[in-house]
Amino acid sequence: MRLPEIPHRLGWLNYWSDAAARTIGFPDPTSDAELLSRARRTATGGWVVRLMDAPLDLDNPAHLDALKRAYERFPEIGGRSTP
């Protein structure tokens, strides 16, 4: 059964509540250094996280790679983790 805290999908710009971030294991200082460089903590303990600085361009292989890395890092998002 899917937890309501887990986002349904990743966006280029993401807001994760404190509960959502804890559930998906964000932040992990060793594996999330790149994401943390583009993240900020909200006053309520949530996180606003950008996958890259530039606007999304699906024709740019680097942007597709950023999406792929993020989905690999957070397999719970999108329902790809194994129970």
Image (cartoon, rainbow, N blue to C red):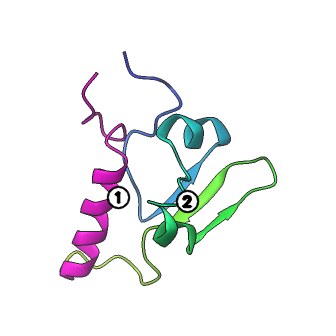
Name the front one of labels 1 and 2. 2
At mark 2, the secondary structure is loop
Q: Residue 64 vs residue 49: left or right?
A: left
The residue at the point 28 percent across, 52 percent down is 72
Query: As shown in the figure, which amino acid type bears the numbered disc 2?
Result: Pro
Query: As shown in the figure, which amino acid type bears the numbered disc 1?
Result: Ala
Q: Is residue 9 magenta?
A: no
Going from the N terminus, do you reach mark 1 or mark 2 first? 2
The residue at the point 37 percent across, 47 percent down is 74
Residue farthest right in this picture = 43
Q: Residue 1 vs residue 18: left or right?
A: left
- Residue 29: numbered disc: 2
Q: Is residue 77 magenta?
A: yes
The residue at the point 50 percent across, 26 percent down is 4
At mark 1, the secondary structure is helix
- Residue 45: numbered disc: none
Residue farthest top in this picture = 1
The residue at the point 24 percent across, 61 percent down is 68
The quadrant in which the C terminus is found is top left
Residue 81: x and y, percent?
A: 27, 33
Vertical comparison of 67 with 76: above or below: below
Q: CA distance from mark 1 to mark 2?
A: 15 Å
From the image, tell me which residue sits under label 1. Answer: 70
Residue 20: x and y, percent?
A: 56, 38
Magenta-drawn segment:
60-83
